[in-house]
Amino acid sequence: MAASCATLPSPSFVSSSKSPRRFRRSGVVAMASIGQKVYAPGVAVSEGNGGLQKIDLKSPHGSEAEIYLFGACITSLKLPNGKDLLFVRPDAVFNGTKPISGGIPHCFPQFGPGPMQQHGFARNMNWSITDSEVTEGNPAVTLELKDDSYSRSMWDYSFQALYKVALHSTSLSTTLKITNTDNKPFSFNSALHTYFSASINGVSVKGLKGCKTLNKDPDPQNPLEGKEEREEVTFPGFVDCIYLGAPCELTLDNGLGDKIIISNSNWSDAVLWNPHLQMEACYKDFVCVENAKIDTVLLEPKQSWLAEQKIELA
């Protein structure tokens, strides 16, 4: 189960024993002028769609990733074979008024519907760059989100979210760290709502057999409890299902000739979603396989919670 998984071998927030060359630039705001700051080799900031700032990560091995500071949303992961493993919906809006629909959006501090906006506010706020580094040619960047009047209008707590994204030759790893900086406890749940490029008729996900399920089809307000009996989950129609106590590694066949290993540490649950005819224009071209923390996390003041994910070609 995810709770017992060993920590992934991705870069942590603490410098490794190899002492990589570090380029720390504190306080770089999301909308800083292009070219105003110096980042590690393989890390660049440029203007993206709609004038939004984005980070470009480039590995000497030929892999590339793109991260928008709005929502800290990873919108592209191109490996040396030239394929983009991630998908951005054709109806995605890049104007800062709504979350970017696609890539890897954040769900924090709420997953799904609830007392605040759908999936919380982290995907609808500007994050800032706090650090960039390169280790053996592999670039990484750390983004930060803190509470402000907008977040407090929905969730009246002080917090810090740090999100480290590291690019390798055939993989991308992320580390999310949530810290309670308030003087009172708070609780939250979270997910990485990952959209993978796919040919939906050929998609399958392995590794979920035996998990407890909460199936939101047909009634999302009253999910049906069950148990996954299949070795491979396929997508013949609408799918919206939570898997509690998911394993720390899943295998996605994207139907495009790629097998993708999705591994994690401390993301205890998984979510599979494809809207089928509810999104007729593009449902055949993607599938969401999401690492999630559905059970509520309670943090006392100064406590932190950390979870890692790694996406890698098999």
Image (tube, grey):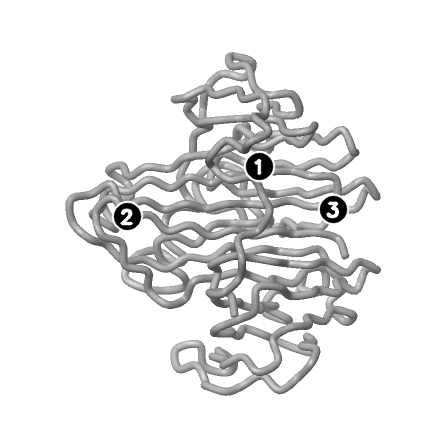
Of mark 1 and mark 3, the one earlier in the sequence is 1
Q: Nearer the viewer, residue 110 or 270?
A: 270
What's under tag 3, amino acid-wise? Asp
Q: Secondary structure at mark 3?
A: loop
Q: Nearer the viewer, residue 37 or 98?
A: 37
Say whether marks 1 and 2 touch (CB < 8 Å): no
Q: Nearer the viewer, residue 49 or 199?
A: 199
Can you tell which quarter of the image residue 252 is in?
A: bottom right
236 displayed left or right of 210: right
Rendered image: mark on residue 84: 3
Of mark 3 and mark 2, the one earlier in the sequence is 3
Crowding near the residue tagged with mark 2, few <14, some 14–19, many ≥20 C-alpha atoms within 10 Å: few
Q: Secondary structure at mark 2?
A: loop
> In x, y percent, where is residue 309?
56, 52
Rendered image: mark on residue 67: 1
Of mark 1 and mark 2, the one earlier in the sequence is 1
What's under tag 1, amino acid-wise? Ile
Residue located at (69% from left, 65% from top): 251
> In x, y percent, where is residue 190?
41, 57
Q: Secondary structure at mark 1?
A: strand
- How far is the residue under mark 3 from the one under mark 2? 37 Å
Residue located at (50% from left, 80% from top): 213
What's under tag 2, amino acid-wise? Gln
> In x, y percent, where is residue 150?
28, 40
Rendered image: mark on residue 303: 2
- How far is the residue under mark 1 from the one under mark 2? 27 Å
